[in-house]
Image (spheres, rainbow, N blue to C red):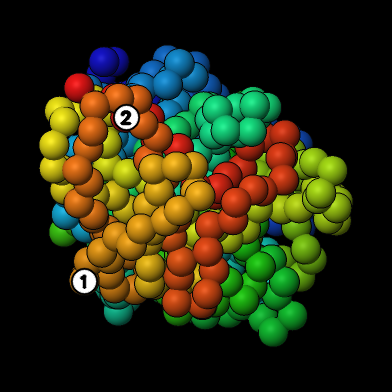
Amino acid sequence: MTGPASINRRRFLQALSAGGAAAVLAACGDSGDPEATPAAEPIADEAATQPASAWFKDTTPFIAHDDGKSLEARLENMDGLITPERFFFVRNNSVSLDVDVDSWRLSIEGDAVANPRTFTDDDIRALPSRTLVCYLECAGNHRAMFGLVQGRQAKGTQWKTGGVSNGEWVGVPLRDVLTQAGITDDAVSVLLIGLDAESPEQGFRRVLPVAKALHPDTLLAYGLNGEELPRDHGYPLRALVPGWVGSSNVKWLGRIVVSKERLWTRNNTTSYVLIGDDYAPEGQAPGKVATTQVIKSALALPWPALLNAGAHQVHGYAHSPEGPIQRVEWSLDSGATWHEATVREGQVQYSWARFDFEWDARPGEHTVMTRATDAAGNTQPDEIPFNEKGYLFNQPVPHPVRVT
Ligand code: MTE
C-alpha cells in the first residue's frame, strides 16, 4: 500500500481565500463558462503528479483494481446494514486528497446566484444538519457482468458487485447553502467541482439539475458513520445525492457554480453516458446521461464462493433508488424457478436492504441468482441493452459457488 498522498493544496487554497479570488476564477475558468480553459496555472497540477495508487485506508480488505483508482468492497465482509468505513468502497478518478481544512473554502458563484460567497468549514457546520442512511454506488458497479453474462465486455474498471456500500451520512442540505448565496428562480444547473484533478486543468465535476440540487435530501456531507468524513471519501466536504450515480457525489468539494444554462462537462458527455444502439443522444451527450441508479441485488459471498455441503444461511444486499426493497427471490436454475428470500427489517431512508435465505447446498458447481423488487414495483430485468461503458448493469447476477 502506498502511504497517504501528501498533496500540498495550500497554494491553490491560499489563492481561493481572500485576495486571490480573481486568480482562482482564472484558474478554474470564469463563472460564466465553467468549462473554459484555464488561463493561469492548472488547479491540481500536483495532484496529477501523485502516484495513482495513493490511498489513506488499509487496502487489504478490498479488491484493488489495476487502474489504481478503485477499491472494490468485498460484500462478504459485511453482515449488518451499515458498511464500516474500513470496508467502504472507494472510486477515485485521480488520487485521494489531503485537504487542509483551515484554509479550505467552498465558493458558490455563477450567473444564477445573487450573492456569490465562500463558506469556511465552521460556516458549514453552523448550519442545521441532517443525518441520512444512504447507499452509494458507482455507475459502473456490476460492469464485469456485461462480459461474464452477456459475452460482450464493456470498457472500464471491471467491477463485479462491490462498487457499492451503505453509510450513515451527516451534512447540511445543499439547498440551504445555495439559498444563502441567493440562488435565483431562473437557475437551471448546479455544477459541483472537486479539488482533485479530473484532467490537469479541471477538478472532478458533475452537473445536477436544479430540482435535484434543491431536494432536501441532497446533502453536503461532513460525517460518515458517526465519524469525520474520511479523506478517501472526500474530507472535509462531499456531495451526497441519494439515488444518483456515484459520480454525482463529488468529493473534496471546493466550488459550486449555479448557472441559468444547462451545463455540459466531461462527466455528462464523455463519461457517465449510456452509449449504444438503444440509447438516443441527449443534448451534447452521445447517449443517455446516467443519472439515477437502478435496482440491483448481490450476494455477500466471495467470487467465486467455496462452501461445504450442507445447510447455509446465505445473505446479501439489494437496493433501489425508487423505494424500499420489498421482495428478493433466489434461483439455482438461471431464473427458471425462483424462491423467496427474507428481506430483513431496518431499511430506512435510502438504505440498502439485507436479505437472507437458507440453502441446503449439494456438492457440485452452482450459480446462485438473486432478483429484487422495490415498493414502486420495479424488478430486476432479465436482460438490459448493452452500453459501451458498461453502466447500470442490473440483470440478476449468476454468482458462481462450488460446493464440496
Ligand atoms: N469526487 C471527486 N472529487 N473525485 C472523484 O474521483 N469519484 C466519484 C465520486 N466523487 C470522485 C468523486 C465516483 S466515480 C464515485 S463512484 C464516488 O465518488 C465514490 O465515492 P467513494 O470513493 O466515497 O466511495
Identify the residue at horizontal 75%, vertical 57% (top origin).
Answer: 263
Above/below status of 141 relative to 379: above
Say left or right for 284 vs 78: right
Location of residue 6 in the rendering, given as x and y in whole percent from the top left corner: 32, 24
Between 51 and 63, the one lying in front of the other is 63
Q: Which residue, given by chain and number where applicable, does mark 1 sit on? A: 345
Q: Earlier in the sequence, mark 2 or mark 1?
A: 1
- Helix, strand or loop status at disc 2: strand
> Measuring 62% from the left and 76% from the top, which residue is drawn there?
211
Indicate the position of residue 285 as horizontal and vertical percent values: 81, 48
Which dot, 2 or 1, sits closer to the camera? 2
Q: Secondary structure at mark 1?
A: loop
- CA gap, disc 2 and disc 1: 27 Å
Placement of the N terminus among the 4 image quadrants: top left
Q: Which residue is mark 2?
A: 401
Q: Amino acid at mark 1?
A: Glu
Crowding around mark 2 (Cα neighbors within 10 Å: few <14, some 14 to 19, many 20+) is: many
Residue 399 appears in the rendering: yes
Instruction: Say which quarter of the image contains residue 306.
Output: top left
The relative height of residue 122 versus residue 86 in the rendered view (above or below) is below
Dividing the image into 4 quarters, which one contains the C terminus?
Answer: top left
Amino acid marked by disc 2? Val
